[in-house]
Image (cartoon, rainbow, N blue to C red):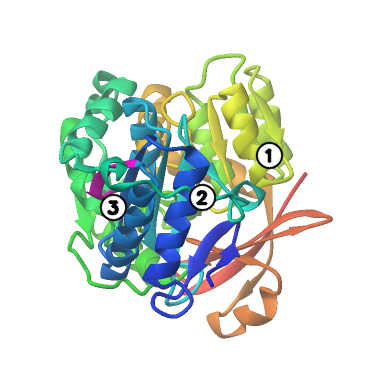
Amino acid sequence: MPSLFDGRIVGVPNKDFTPDIAARLGEQFGSYLGRKSVVVSGRDYNPSSRMLKRAFTSGLMSVGVEVLDFHESLNGEISFSIKRFGAKGGFLFTTSHSVKDSVLLRLFKSPGFELTGPKLGFENIEVGRVGLGDIGWVMYSEYIHKLYVSAVLSFVKVDEIIPRGFKLVVHTAYSPADMLVPDILKALEADYVLLQNVKAKAYESTYPFTRELERVCRIIKATDAELGVVVNNDASSMVVIDREGRVLLPEEVMFLIALNAPRGSLILADSRVPGVFKKLLAERDIKVVELESEEELIEMSYKMRPYLVYRFNGSFEVPLFSLGYDAVITLVKLLESIAMAKVNVSEVVGKYREKAYEEVKRVSPEKVPSETNLALPTLFGYYKRTPEGSKYIVYKPEAGEFSLLSPRF
């Protein structure tokens, strides 16, 4: 049987996550949502994700659930489309970056928030299979990408972004983001280099993305780009690199986006935020609320609809757009904020990095395992929540080593 990792269903295909188990999960999820519900679905490029998605879909159909199939799609698209089409739920199969050789299943409920941890407790629900005339349909929606891109561009002030003339390097990690990012950046009239925009059969990179960060850093230097961005394979998380080759931490990305937030805005985080950022935001009447768990973060995001939500691993949510983690809309909001605030990212990061964090020591890749006990892997390194506060082990792509950072509170 598949297990839970970080509150989500994960398993090795054809070993502990077989097609028959996927079909059973589909039956349970469909029975939980109810007969004649509409569910949206997606996957990454990996054939194991395709296999399990089809099995899960058959389970949904067997209990009378209708499925809108988006083929290759992103986490943000699933969440957005649930609200857009009035669906009852959604699901997404992708290769796991955290558990080697495994596939990850994300489940969503209307109006677009993800079910995690205790919310997945529907395995004991009574399955209600239907008769021949009530089997669910599968409908293909080929235009979801265009609808999503149009919605993203309508959500921001494109006319404010274009004059900035951004130069970007974007690594899509063999994800379906390669179908969206070019159209969005062209509309923003940005110069960009797009990496890994091919359909790899199996993208085996696990966190942290050291190779990807090094490659993006080299191209930033070679092209004099302003920013580099690396997303994971469902574009639920992202990491940003500045012109100096520094990896920005989630709090720094949050602060840059908040430069454009209206007074009185609310930001939710599942980790402790360094005092310097909270103080600067408080001066603009922007409140940062720190929550204890992701389940609480998702629940409060749904109830309060804050300006921005973020996790320690680089997952961002813009609730006024959709309730799912979405690196694409986050990137566009970041560009909008930088353009409207007329700031230099490297200067902002350089000004506040030492005020927000203390570098405890540098660690070579060979010695990282001894420093990461109980730490969770992320795109950019590792994260550990301690009684003293949040600690990061961040990869420095130019130096080829890790930096142990302790926030100043």
Sooner in the amino-acid sequence: mark 2 or mark 1: 1
Identified at 65% across, 49% down, the residue is 354
Q: What residue lies at 45% left-to-right and 61% top-to-bottom?
A: 24
Question: Which residue position is annotated with label 3?
Answer: 170
Q: Quadrant of residue 283?
A: top right
What element does badge 2 sit on? loop
Tell me the kind of residue under disc 1.
Glu
Give the mark, 3 or 1, whose residue is nearer the N terminus.
Answer: 3
The residue where tag 2 is placed is 314
Front residue of 23 and 218: 23
Looking at the figure, which quarter contains the C terminus? top right
In front of the other: 236 or 220 = 236
**Residue 296 shows up from this direction:** yes
Q: Please give the residue where the numbered disc 1 appears in the rendered image.
A: 296
Q: Is residue 228 visible?
A: no
Q: Residue at x 38, y 22 (%)?
A: 340
Counting from the top left corner in percent of width and height, residue 344 is at: 41, 36
Q: Which residues are magenta?
A: 66-74
Residue 68: x %, y % from top left: 27, 41
Q: Looking at the image, which is closer to me, 404 or 52?
A: 52
Taking the magenta stretch, the answer to whether it contains residue 164 is no
